Image (spheres, coloured by chain):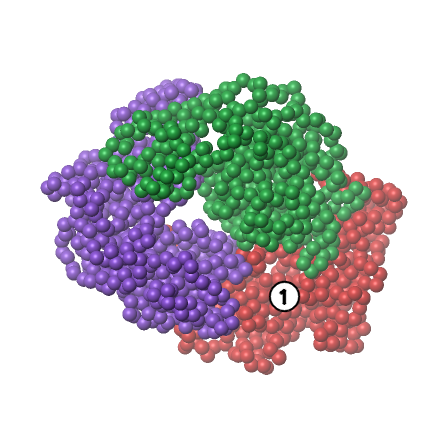
Chain colours: A red, B purple, C green
Amino acid sequence: MAAWKINQDFHGGLVRCLATSVAAVAIAVLSSQAARAETRDFAFSLFYPATYTQPDNCPQGANPRTHDIYKNALVTTGTPPDEAERIIETAVSASGSGGGNAGFKPITERGKFNGQAVNAYANPLTVPDPGFKTAVGRYALGFNLDGRGAADAGAFEHPETHEKGIDNQLFRVYGCLANYQATPPAQPNYPLETWEMVAGTMPAWLLSVSAEDFSKDGSEVTITIDRALNRLLRDGKGHPRSHATFRVDHDPRSHNVFKGKIENGVIKASVPKVYFMGDQFFIPDFDFTQVKLELKLEDSGHSHGTLGGYLPWIGIYYQHGANGLNAETFRGMDMVGLYRALMRTADADPDPATGQNRRISTAWFMELVPAFTIPAEQANANVPK
Amino acid sequence: MLLSKKLLSGICGGLAAALLATEFAGAALAASEPESTGGNLIVRRLSADQYTATLLSVFGQDLDLGGRFEPDLRESGLLAVGASRVSVTSTGLERYEATARAIAEQVVDEHHRATLVPCTPANARAADDTCASAFLSNVGRLLYRRSLTPDELAVQVRVAHTSAGTVKSFYDGLSISLAMMLTSPQFLFYRDVAEPDPGNKGGLRLTAHSKASRLSFLLWNAGPDKELIAAAESGVLHTPKGLNRQVERMMSSPRLETGVRAFFSDMLQLDNFSLLTKDTAIYPKFTIDVARDAREQTLRTVVDHLLLRDADYRQLFTTPNTFLTPLLGTVYEVPVAPVDELDSSSAGWQPFSFPAGDPRAGFLAQASFVALHSHPGRSSPTLRGKALREILLCQTVPDPPANVDFTIVQDTKHATYKTARDRVTAHLLNPVCAGCHKLIDPMGLGLENFDSSGAYRATENGVKIDASGEINGTKFTNAAELARAVSATPQTASCLVNRVYAYGAGRPAVQGEADFIKHLESSFAGDGYRLTALLRRIATSKAFYRVAAPETRKAELPTQLASQSQETVK
Amino acid sequence: MIINRQTTRRRILRGMLGGTAVTVGLPLLNIFLNTNGNAFANGTALPTCFGTFFYGLGLTPGQWEPKIVGPNYEVHSELEALKAFKNKVNVYSGLKCYLDGHSNQVHSTGVQVTVTGGISRGRADTKSSIDTIIADVVGTRTRFRSLEVNSMGRSQSNSRREGGTANPAETAPGALYTRIFGPEFVDPNSANFTPDPQTIARRSALSGITEQRQALITDLGADDRTRLDQYFTSLRELEQQLELALQKPAPMASCSMPDKGEDAPAGTVVEDVMANNALFSRLLAHALACGQTQVFNSVLTDGASNIRKAGSADTHHVLTHEEGSDESGYQSGVSWFNRRNIESLAALIAALDAVREGDRTLLDRSLIYAVTDTGLAKVHSLENMPLITVGSANGRMKTGIHVHAQGDPATRVGLTVQQAMGIASAAWGTESNATSKAISEVLA
């Protein structure tokens, strides 16, 4: 661990620093502290659901796109096909010419409750199940979260390790949407778009790992996940800048500390719960349970890995349903279908009263860039004129 | 003079001789100011910064000055010297006139006229010569750095008068007359005027007005203010007491910072940031805003070190103290947290101290040096060594011959030559190149731990970088030791003295000023190498305002070793 | 008084090279310009025109950027339609819009940056758009300060003044025809000429400086006198420019009345939008040729463009989000619309280039700045914004060049455009989008 002095006249605190060439310099200078564990700090530079698209995932074909979503929505709620086409043409034409979205009312308010038309996105169960297609197939990326392994009939197999019982039902839900088709290293469209939208404005997520010796297999590591007060910076290529400095938010809701181990050069950890605040354009709260994490530290100083756990599926629905017409128009997601698919596919945390599962297994890829972190309260310097 | 002739030959043997010759320059400590001849009278074109600073001081800070100006020319290491060689082109004049009109319109517009125009016309839709004359003579005195002659004022008032008639508005007419003044040569050029020097029989000195301008551009990089013009008009500026008083007043003004920034921008050639590009594929972090911050980092460091701390100039090369933004922090790979947590971008300068022994301490390690003197896609020991010699030690390095094969030097992925040291060493097998490179590269190699973007690196292509070298016989093993060697070498301080003098005078010192320069060099040492002391000595000297007698002017060859211009070498 | 009335190119060059005065940059005197008697009839250059062209949803990375940087670049894929005009087109790649922590107001932030130089914090904070900055300088003497058109039939334009008042766009070609060429149209070649009082006053002010020459050069050394004389030569050139502006302008030989044409229906169907764009383009070309305006703004589509094929709800915007892509991000349906957008730009170019003025065309004395709202629309990227300029602005821009400026703010192009149009802007933009670095390789 290297300690940095930012002009002690103005600052009092210490700054955590990653071990790169910079730290090497600092360690040489501050050799009295060399015995302490090394800490490497990172900022999340990308975070998206793990997909592993295979040709046999959707034998019935992909979920329909905009026009057919509109038409299904109307026809399955009683509008004759010709009339449905007319409504769509009018709505699209008016909206496209600046006339607003009023023409979409028969679509957005396709729910029926006590004989009244109600908003389908807020009341998805007031619309008949449109039959959302979910993925089948053998493989998915992620973790065996519940430990049931091969006994878990609905689970997948890991395509590389061939471990059985991989719990990633969110991949099943998203698997037949055009926007989520990707096999690593390709990345799915819509999650990238979401990240692009939030990364420049939402406070960055931070991850730190500490170990006595990163090169020693079996070493215990301490992992910390926090949220920053400031956001990512970008470089000339548009990628998140490495070696930016972040203030750590004190909010205990986004503060997680847990232990892990280095196995075959990979940091692995299991922890009952990880929670960090998200963003209104993303999932508002990432409330993971039965969490597993794998992290690989790269020679370049960057890092990448996977975070798996169960999330409340209602938050995932909220990400899309909060702006339902847009999701149906631009994401190829029938909102009612998505809601029902999440409900059906959810695989953990049954409601004691109804038995309905409230959480769904997920796995997320994360990419991390080296960063510096300092405590939120560390005073700023008075800038001399 | 012998040395000049050697330099004229354009070979590096001359350079070596020059190195030796400067050794004894600062040796003798002279107590009182030696006699000095002064140099030629010159006419300088206002620089863009001088134009802006002058107008801001005359009309206030809230004007939008916009404006694009003619490119400046650097001679003898300084734009301030090139300013006495340039004129105004046709496109340049078009821009000056357009800028002048935009500014003049603001000065008389409804937001500003109450404060900036001292009177109200009898009729806003017609001419008012009394009011126009009051305004134009007031403002003209500041713009022309002296009172207008009766003829000049008459023309300005006449233009305001006829224009007011043509455009049916007093204020628009006034604005046209003001724009004319801002476009006129009396404003755009400042000119030395000489008069007999009563204290030096048969000799000449600058007139009080020319003296005021020279002083004001040296310290503030702008024309004289009302008080200084008044001191010139009353003749007080010609008395030692009156001069001292003005110098003290000006040096305690916040505008001194503007002047010091302008000098170092010029000497360190920071204007070249506007042309600097880096290959983003190789250095993605080096964006246009990083370049902007890097320039500012150096200027803030200079102001803090030399003005606020009033510290030894030579320590600028070793000081661990600087100022950084979060963006610069990402380039230097040190923690700089944003001041405003919601805004991580470059806003928010913060003082920063590198730990003792850190190779990134000191000016040489700043992007203003290592990135500015590199190629877009690779570092350059040669460019850095050349810049070190020319900019900081005031030596002259000839340009390479035209027909050199640079293939090896440019191949950063060379199978055999992994590091820049390997590549330039291979290049030296060419004996034509070796002569000069032996003098340039060993200095530059000391900075090889900094890549072209200014980031620290321990290795290149997997091979540990050897940053050892030698400067003027002093060996070093890394950038920090190089910095200490540069700091200690006598040329460093003497170069600054020569540059400040040339900057103020608008020309390098001449033969007849050699004793005075030596005197300045030794008193600079005696004053603890403080820039403020040097400025004060120059500004209060007699020599700075002396003018060479006409018959001796033409024969002068510049003696100043350091600032031989490139043209003379060729 | 001595005024250099007989300045020749040769004499100036000789003076510069042989004399001791050093002048930075060759002076751009009128005599250096083309004087073949066509575009410069009567010695007066026909005025320089400026237009913006906006289309939504950017272009696909990899499908438009030429591989060759500099002149003689290759045109391919989505820029195919520009091939015929390649030598008059500059393409700028690698430029970006900085967010500085502002949220990406998708489909509008990119336009704000490229058109107004920065991101506004709300309507009141909006800066003037580039066309109004230019129109305020070049458009003050024409019948219309600027003309705005929208090919989707919406009144929205990207032209706005500080504080956010947007200039409404003409929504139908027929209406634009009537506005320009209706009963109020006066043939510029038959109209009376009234010299601009402001120019008269400026000229007399410059003469006031010239009068003082003798007093100013007295006592100067030979070198400094040469430098002052250079100044006075430049001053004389400027006076000559103003004198020309005070004479009745050269006849606009290529001014003619256009056919009215028939409007296509307003709306989102791509064929209709393109048809209206073609009509608008032709009317704008005639308006410029007849000196009715020097500035125009053409909006082809909205940012989140809803153009679509007739009978389909898959708008261009929908496809950017919905359509699957190959690994490079290529979406074939999106790319189809991107090509239509560039064809529409080509239609505008063709309309200006079709107006012959001697051995040149109206396009040669124009500068079109074509912008869009995103880089890769699929992710609303503000990286690698495709920017295009067309025309040489009466010789002030070099053309036929691909500029690659990775990571630099997109505002560099806007600043360059302003400088080419003769605006005295040294810098443009706000926050990280501020720049004082014009793209010197394209400025003539």
Q: Residue at x 63, y 59 (%)?
A: A278
Quarter of the image for the N terminus of chain C: give it.
top left
Which residue is disc 1 drawn over?
A366
Q: Nearer the viewer, residue A271 or C104?
A: C104
Task: In the rendered view, tell whether residue C171 sits above or below residue B259.
Answer: above
State whether residue A218 appears in this view: yes
- Residue type (three-letter) at the residue carrying disc 1: Met
Q: Nearer the viewer, residue A60 or A73?
A: A60
* Residue A375 in picture, x, y percent from top left: 49, 64
Q: How many marks?
A: 1
Q: Residue at x 58, y 22 (%)?
A: C188
Q: Quadrant of residue B348?
A: bottom left
* Residue B135 in picture, x, y percent from top left: 33, 28
* Residue B352 in picture, x, y percent from top left: 40, 61
* Residue B477 in picture, x, y percent from top left: 36, 72
Q: Residue at x 49, y 60 (%)?
A: B377
Q: Nearer the viewer, residue A242 or C415?
A: C415
Q: Residue at x 27, y 61 (%)?
A: B14
Task: In the rendered view, tell whether residue B566 sits above or below residue B142.
Answer: below
Looking at the image, which residue sits at the far left? B201
Q: Chain of mark 1?
A: A
State whether residue B187 appears in this view: no
Mark 1 neighbour density, 10 Å: few (under 14) some (14–19) many (20 or more): many
Q: Is residue C370 left or right of residue B177?
A: right
Q: Is residue A374 left or right of residue B540?
A: right
Q: Considering the numbered disc 1 on the image, is that residue within a helix, a strand or a loop?
A: strand
Q: Is residue C177 left or right of residue C51?
A: right
Task: In the rendered view, tell whether residue A306 sits above or below residue C277.
Answer: below
